[in-house]
Amino acid sequence: MTRTDGTAPSGRFNRTRRSVAVSGETLVRTAPLTGGTRAVLVTPTVPGLDAREWLASSGGALARLRDAHGAVLLRGFAPLGAAGLAELATGLDGGLRDYDNRSTPRRRVDGNVFTSTEYPADQTIPQHNEMSYTDAWPATLFLTCVVPAATGGETPVADGARVLARLPEDTRERFERHGVMYVRNFGHGMDLSWQEVFQTGDRAEVDAYCARHGIEAEWLGGERLRTRHVVQATLTARATGERVWFNQAHLFHVSSLPGHVERELRAEFAEDELPRNALYGDGTPLDPADLARVREAYAAEEIALPWEAGDVMIVDNEQFSHGRNPYSGDRSVLVAMA
């Protein structure tokens, strides 16, 4: 069951960046994001405070909060926009990464700041760690809400260590022993094209990328490409040393789709021809009972708070997963990956 909680008032913000000659420790208050989670809410004690100014004066406080709590929601600070989000992320982590080996449709807004995943508003995006279907994922996610949805549209998060602890030992053992194989078939006119995923139309560049990352690539004629990649199911989070659940098996598996869509795809495609699918790392089909347990564990740990305009959420991508709830009205959330 998704847990929800109230939100702190945000007040009005001065959009002009301000220099504040006060020590970083006195500029903010911290509190639990909601009961039963390590995630933390940070609000300013100085009206209109710019998060970049606090970052510069805080002596590493934001990095310590991210490492210790996994997810940090900044609320009540001056809105940042795309350029400001990039500055904050660069100030904390030293640089941003591009979105390579793509899985979802996004638009580039400014440099390496993107829109959040552009799926239809009536659909749920299940919990996932960003790019955990690869061998090279971003360490930190930075999200900011420009326009909150009229209803819904939360970006729920879940603690990966707690998700892992909820799984039965036999489920954990199967995934950890084999890893997860992600299979993608491009060229059917469904899902993203390989040109969009790899950001090139040069097949030699695709082959070189796949070789560097241990991805098996098979060209099948025309525009058809099949890739297989076996990577981790769990990992040890660098910041905490805790073992965490870290994969997208339940999301890539065809059963994550609405029932009628899954039935249509299975009627049209053989198992190895599905646009995307997940298997155990040895190539055997995933046990539906294991997938059900994973989804139940995520549902039990998921925490969702409504966005407010100007909010910034900083997520340690190894410690916490995230998703998106359905929504109505306009919604604009930007993301940068460090």
Image: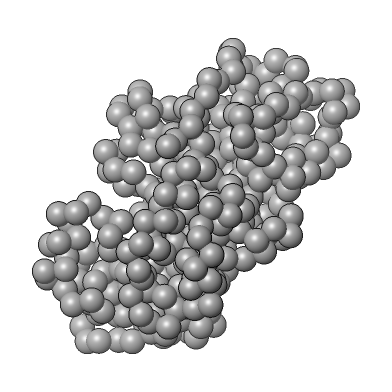
Q: Residue at x 52, y 24 (%)?
A: 5
Q: Spot the residue most to the front.
A: 169
Q: Position of residue 147 (x, y in %)?
A: 43, 28
Give the image location of residue 191, x and y in percent.
Answer: 27, 62
Quadrant, the C terminus: bottom right
244 or 42: nearer the eye? Answer: 244
Q: Nearer the viewer, residue 81 or 154?
A: 154
Q: Is residue 194 left or right of residue 337?
A: left
Residue 192 falls left or right of residue 38: left
Report which quarter residue 45 is drawn in.
top right
Q: Nearer the viewer, residue 318 or 293?
A: 293
Name which residue lies at 72% across and 35% down. 52
Instruction: Tell me if I can see residue 35 in this picture.
Output: yes
Q: Is residue 21 visible?
A: no
The residue closer to the viewer here, 40 or 26, is: 40
Q: Position of residue 326 (x, y in %)?
A: 33, 36
Quadrant location of the N terminus? top left
* Residue 230 vertical position relative to residue 54 in the rendered view, above or below: below
Query: Looking at the image, is 35 positioned above or below residue 333?
Result: above
Residue at the spot 51% in from the left edge and 36% down from the top edge: 303
Residue 313 lies in quadrant: top right
Total marks in image: 0
| Image position of 37 with respect to 232: above or below | above
Is 8 left or right of 324, judged from the image as shown?
right
- Residue 135: percent from the left, percent from the top? 55, 72
